Amino acid sequence: MSNAHAPAPTSRREQILKEAARLFAERGFHGVGVDEIGAAVGISGPGLYRHFAGKDAMLAELLVGISERLLAGGRMRVEEGGENPAAVLDALIDGHIDFALDDRPLITLHDRELDRLREADRKRVRQLQRQYVELWVQVVRQVHAESAESEVRAAVHAVFGLLNSTPHLGRPGSLPGRPEMARLLHRLALGAFGAVDAEAAAGAGDGAVAARRAG
């Protein structure tokens, strides 16, 4: 995902996917008919079949597609970040925050409907997600070099859980504005990663105390 807000869909296919994601997230995959998706974009239900074979195909494109875009965006940020791991981490966090704030229906859809995908599509999503996690782990370990890899990986998953909580944070009117919310999430993510260093420092301090006592 880019650092800009999610652009308005430009093609009819993108419009269909956007409305399908919104409706699936609001009412569940089986609670939405093809005719309702068509009405949301101003075409007849049967007209959707010129773009998609059916709802299953829409769901697969939504969930595989966002996993592909997150990984591609993450790789782009790593390449553009050069030799500054902290700047790369900031960019990764910003990119994921854009997704978490602008594509909330896809987060809900993933949580609820991933198991409805065909096995091949589900495996593809999981494979892409693993690669995305490992991309973050490599960058975080460069920034927090003293931390154990297992703790860094756990912290990455925890930060994803934090950022992907946006669909559950309350009504939009009850939250800070988007720029303020993005900055808050960024600070929270950095704080979570900083806690890994704090744990490593505490462990080193305990070891030094034990060594002095033994001496």
Image: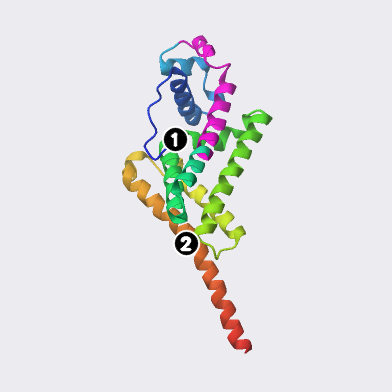
- Is any atom of residue 188 visible in this view? yes
Residue 155, percent from left and from top: 54, 55
62 or 165: nearer the viewer: 62
Residue 184 forms part of the magenta stretch: no
Callout 1 amino acid: Asp
Residue 45 forms part of the magenta stretch: yes
Q: Residues within 10 Å of mark 1 (few under 14, many from 20)?
A: many
Q: In the image, which disc is placed on residue 103?
A: 1
User: Residue at 51% across / 61% down in the picture?
Assistant: 144
Q: Quadrant of the N terminus?
A: top left
Q: Which residues are magenta?
A: 44-71
User: Residue at 39% across / 33% down in the picture?
Assistant: 6
Q: Which residue is mark 2?
A: 194
Residue 111, percent from left and from top: 55, 38
Query: Relative to 29, is 139 above or below?
Result: below
Q: Quadrant of the C terminus?
A: bottom right
Secondary structure beneath disc 1?
loop
Secondary structure beneath disc 2?
helix
Residue 113, percent from left and from top: 58, 32
Mark earlier in primary sequence (1, 2): 1
Residue 52, percent from left and from top: 55, 17
Is most of the magenta stretch helix, strand or loop?
Answer: helix
Callout 2 amino acid: Gly
